[in-house]
Each structure stands twice: as C-alpha cells, then as structure tokens.
Amino acid sequence: MSRSVPTLFAQVQSYFADYLPKQRGASAHTIRAYRDALTLLFRFVADQRGKCVASLGIEDVDVDAVGQFLNHIEADRSNTAATRNCRRAAIRGFFKHLLRNDLLHAQQFMRVLAIPSKKARQRPATYLEPPDARLIIDAPDKRSRDGWRDYVLLLFLYNCGARVSEACGLQWDDLQLVAPRQVRLRGKGKKERLLPLWSETAQALHRLRGLTGSAGGQCVFLNRQGQPLTRDGVAYILSKHVAAATRINSTLRRKRITPHVMRHYAEFGIVGTGSQPICWSARWTSA
C-alpha cells in the first residue's frame, strides 16, 4: 500500500493519539467511549470476515459491515436505540477522520457516514424540586471534615450545574471567593465557562480551604488519601446522602438521582423567589 494512504490501524492510532486529545480536545470519558465502540465494531467485523482483528483492512469496514454491526448490538446485545445512536456517533467520528486522511476511499466512507440515526424514545429529564435538592445538600454531617467536603461538593454542583469531571478537576486557582464571586470551569473540548458563585457557596469553599490547608494549584475536592475525587467517588458521595435524605422524604426513592441530575438545574435555568437564585443558567453566564 502506498505510504500516502495509512493502514486502518495507523488511522486508529492517529485518531486516538493525536486527533481526539490534541486537536479536538476530547475528554478522557469521550475517548474511552469512542474506543469501546470501535473495539466492538472491529471484533464484530473480524468475526464476520473470519479474520483476526489485526489483519483487518480499510476495505473490510464498509457500509454493510457497519450497518450489520449496528443491527447486531440492538438484536443480539439488547442495546437500546439510544445506545445504538451513541455507537453510531462514535463510528461517524472515526470515519470523518478517515475521510480527511484517505480520499482514495472517500466513497466508502461517505456511505458509512450516510447511515441514519434511529428514532429513540425521549425520556423526560429527571430533576429535583428545590426543597428535595436542599434536603440532599444538607444531609452530610458538617461537623466532620469529610462531611463538610461532601456538603460543599453537593452545594457546588447545585450552584453551578458543573459536570462531574469539572468538579473533580476544579483547582483553587479557578475560584474567586470575593466579589465578584465566580468560578472558571474547564469542560469538554477544553472550553471554559465563567459562572457566578452564591455567597453561601463561596463561604463554604473558603472554610473548606481552611480545613484542608490546600495550595492554589491543588484540586479542591480530595479524598481521604489527599487525591482528587474520581467520578465514582462523587457518585458514591451523592448516593450516600440521597439515602439519608430518603429517610426523611420517602418520595425520593422513586427518582434515580445521579450527579447529572444536579446539573439539570442550570440547564433549565430554575430560579427562586427570594433574593438568592435557586440556580443560575450556565447559558446566561458562559464566558
């Protein structure tokens, strides 16, 4: 094969090692999702072709193979239409990369990119009423350092509508705790947002810093080992305090409350009736 036309796995390497992290600025979570989708696709195609994965070529991954794979994950792996569409989106991202770097197979790639998405049932977004959200936020024991950290974390998520990855990566240098109180969040694609902080949140963060003695370049939310909280750690903290709040309000059992549910406040732009808003819309305050 001509050196000007990279092999399939040379394209895979450049996609994951260069394009996604360096040019697109994709998060580690996005890269893992795309990697998993392509791994499933290549294994399926290799089984269909009677080959090993390492011997697959660009010509093996055509529109028929991709279409059969998408049908397979629905019919045989019991994936929903929404999951199918997510896998399709990941595959489309890779085929756009192929198209940019290999015009010789452009028609093959265009046919794959033309595969339509499947209509998926839209589930209503889960959200909490403000009193229920406050019940969860106030559940931690604020007398202990871990309890105060949990309280500040939940309050911060509620105030800003931050993604879990943004909260985990938040550093003290990203915060301005005196007027105008604000936080700079670094989200997907290394995009930055500048959001206001309530006085309650700023004061709680200030006390947390005093309890931990953290320096400017350190992450705000740490575990007991002094390491930044992980996605799983945040999910565990939330689930623990949701369970405590449920003992007071049993109706919370009917809701699946995840860290992303806290983010819905900012998306919906819910505000309170008092002098302090229940939540700001991130869209209104994007930098």
Image (cartoon, grey):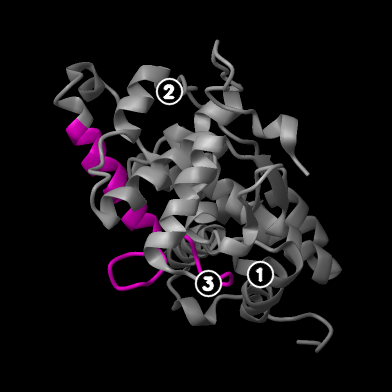
Amino acid found under the numbered disc labelled 3: Ala
Q: Is residue 239 shown in magenta?
A: yes
Q: Secondary structure at mark 1?
A: helix
In which quadrant of the rendered image does the N terminus lie? bottom right
Vertical relation: 228 (above or below) 181: below
> Does any portion of residue 255 appear in the rendered image?
yes
> In whole angstroms, how far apart are the C-alphas of marks 1 and 3?
28 Å
The answer to which of marks 2 and 1 sits earlier in the sequence is 1
Pointer 2 local density, CA inside 10 Å: few below 14, some 14–19, many at least 20 = some
Residue topped by disc 3:
215
Whether residue 152 is situated above or below residue 7 in the rendered picture: above
- Amino acid under label 2? Tyr
- Sequence order check, earlier mark of 1 and 3: 1
Q: How many marks?
A: 3
Looking at the image, do the residues carrying marks 2 and 1 touch, with CB atoms under 8 Å apart? no
For the residues carrying marks 2 and 1, which lies nearer the camera in this image? 2
Q: Residue at x 45, y 34 (%)?
A: 262
Relative to the observer, which residue lies in front, 79 or 281?
281
Residue wearing tag 2: 127
Q: Tell which of 21 and 113 is nearer to you.
A: 21
